[in-house]
Amino acid sequence: MFPKIIIKELGPINLEGGYLIDGFPSMGFSSVIATESMIHTSQFRLAGVIDSNIFPPISLIKNGKPNYPTRIFVNDELKVGAFLSHLALEEPLHREIARKMIRWAKTKKISLIVSSVSVKSDAGNEEVMAVGSTDEATNKINNAGIKNFENGTIPGIPGALLNEGSTTGQDVIVIVFHSDGTSPDFRSSAKLCNVMSQLIPGASCDIPALQKEAEKVEQVIKKDVEDAKHLKDSMYR
């Protein structure tokens, strides 16, 4: 049986014709850092939480307030939503999370889901590419002046989103960016943020603030992920 994944909306959400960002950790933390930067720069509000009985029961305390580790943020003016998670989910959950995201996007009549994945590369290879789930998504990549990712593999939630999007007709774009594996990888986070801004009209990132906070944010995310992992490990011994 698949684990039940629940989305709890905290109020009305209108994203018809808008965008959804996949901010789950994927092959590192650049995706989460870039999504966090966009949320803080573009004035998003907390609009919902994502929970499951298979998630570790953990609360992230921020400024003295409890938070679910996986949350939904929305910018009402830009019609942009973001699934932001400080949980590094195990592989068996990736497909189900992707399906839940696609179903939710269909319900909200979202036009485009934007995800991302990092590829380890040698120094000097910093080209950012993207791949779309549909012809329309590919046209959006071309119109943004981004090179198409022609051959290779996309793992995890981003790969599952592409597959689900291709069979349901949901436009999904996965940005493929290069990372040298260093910590913190500000350069890849900044590049990713800029490309996301090209695909999502009106969205932006505060790059100077991102550079200043990248190391701090990554340390916080890594600690949250490790705490959740240790708790889950102890639950199922």
Image: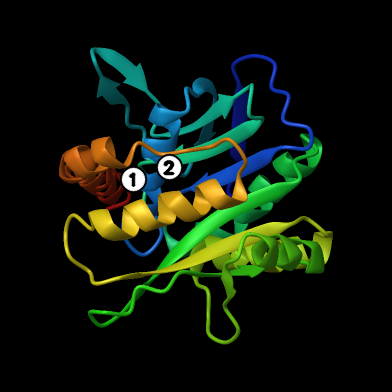
Residue under numbered circle 1: 33
Report x, y in % for residue 199. Answer: 60, 51
Residue 117 pos. (x, y %): 45, 64
Which residue: 24% across, 15% down? 63
Residue at left offset 17%, top offset 44%: 219
Q: Is residue 215 left or right of residue 29?
A: left
Contact between labelled residues 1 and 2, with CB atoms less than 8 Å apart: yes
Image quadrant for the N terminus? Answer: bottom right
Considering the numbered disc 1 on the image, is that residue within a helix, a strand or a loop?
helix
Which mark identifies residue 63? none
Three-letter amino acid code at the position of disc 1: Ile
> Horizontal and vertical percent for residue 182?
17, 65
In the depicted structure, whether residue 165 falls above or below residue 59: below
- Position of residue 221 relative to residue 155, above or below, is above
Q: Which mark is residue 35?
A: 2
Q: Nearer the viewer, residue 152 or 53?
A: 152
Crowding at label 1, few (<14), some or many (≥20) Cα neighbours within 10 Å? many
Residue 234 x/y as whole percent: 24, 47
